[in-house]
Image (cartoon, grey):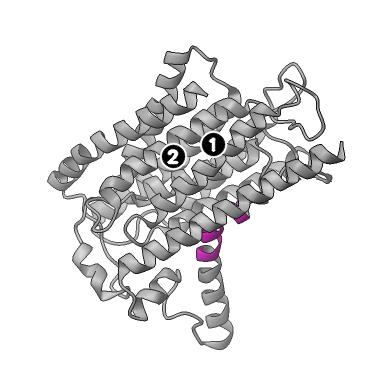
Amino acid sequence: MRGIFIAAGVALAISILLTPYLIRFFARQGFGQEIRAEGPQSHQAKRGTPTMGGVAIMIAIWLGYLLSHMVTGEQISPSAMLVLFLTTALGVVGFLDDFIKLRRARNLGLNKTSKIVGQVLTATVFGILALRFGNADGLTPGSDSLSFVRDIAVLSFGLVGFVLLANLIIAAWSNAVNLTDGLDGLAAGTAAMVLGTYVIICFWQFRNNCALASAAGCYQVRDPLDVGVLAAAAMGACIGFLWWNAAPARIFMGDTGSLALGGLVAGLSIVTRTELLLVVIGGVFVVEALSVAMQILVFRTTRRRVFRMAPFHHHFELAGWAETTVIIRFWLLAAMCAALGLGLFYSEWLTASAGG
């Protein structure tokens, strides 16, 4: 438990203190955000705001996690390191995308093929390794079964099927967070709530782990406490970054941060066996992605638009809502989704433990 607090506190402090240095450095380098011409006109004033702030988030996550282990002396686990690999690799893909945008002074970085190749390679390596590193009980970081709060035994895919599933989950979440990152602090604040939920889930799985006591309702999950330390570091990093990213934003996270955070929550869902539960916990990310898919599908079939603009947070801006109003209300929705997901998680445990 002490490691969770240390990781969150260290990451929070590093993110808050490091981000202003990045703001000044990126401003001197001319690393300013390009704005879509077809977007809300109020956003044109944000042109030139430093981006790639996801660098601060990733550094804070790494340092928060590692310094926590240095203080507590706890062993670093394969599960957490795999999720960190996934987060960092996708962050590198996002960094390349951001860097190309800035160098070419346009709102288009890596082409679709290059970005997809980067995501697929990362997800494939993660998927293969997640079924390795079995502990004394044979538990691996990942499971080849689809999960809600725990594995669904009838939905087992094998190695190849699991790698394909991991690719689908990771691509979906990295792109969903990326699409949500369109208003000041929206993605960072929402991600912090999702990650905070996972801190609680991981700690609960640790306290009720089958390796400690094989009671009814216990969880067959490897390394839940260490994964909780990682989730806490990421939560602290997002909150610290939000200090500078909240409206009016002094810096944007860019694809560096959004792809990394999307990979992080996807990885957490896989190693905690909560892949379907994440759809509820991260409901705002899901709705944002669905709004884009719906807009494209309906427009291509009927030549009509469902929303004034997608992702649909822009729909409310174009309807006359102030940006801060949209952000706060979406944060409230994110909090409700996180609370609902946590409630489902706990109610399942109550049912499982009572049924035993």
Could you classify mark 1 by the number of other residues whose Cα lies within 10 Å: few (under 14), some (14-19), or many (20 or more)?
many
Point 40% across, 27% down: residue: 64
The reply, left or right, for residue 208 in relation to residue 155 is left
Residue 56 in view of the camera: yes
> Which image quarter is the C terminus in?
top right
- Looking at the rendered structure, which numbered label has been put on residue 199? 1
Q: Indicate the secondary structure of the residue bearing disc 1.
A: helix
Query: Could you tell me how far apart the alpha carbons at marks 2 and 1 are, in whole angstroms?
Result: 9 Å
Q: Are marks 2 and 1 in contact (CB under 8 Å)?
A: yes
69, above or below 149, in the image:
above
Measured as percent of width and height from the top left, residue 26 is found at 19, 44
Measured as percent of width and height from the top left, residue 232 is found at 47, 34
Point 76% across, 22% down: residue: 213
Q: Which of the two labelled residues, at mark 2 and mark 1, occupies the earlier sequence position?
A: 1
316, above or below 350, in the image:
below
Q: Indicate the secondary structure of the residue bearing disc 2.
A: helix
267, above or below 206, in the image:
below
Amino acid under label 1? Val
Q: Could you tell me what secondary structure mostly forms the magenta stretch? A: helix
- Looking at the rendered structure, which numbered label has been put on residue 235? 2
Measured as percent of width and height from the top left, residue 219 is found at 73, 32
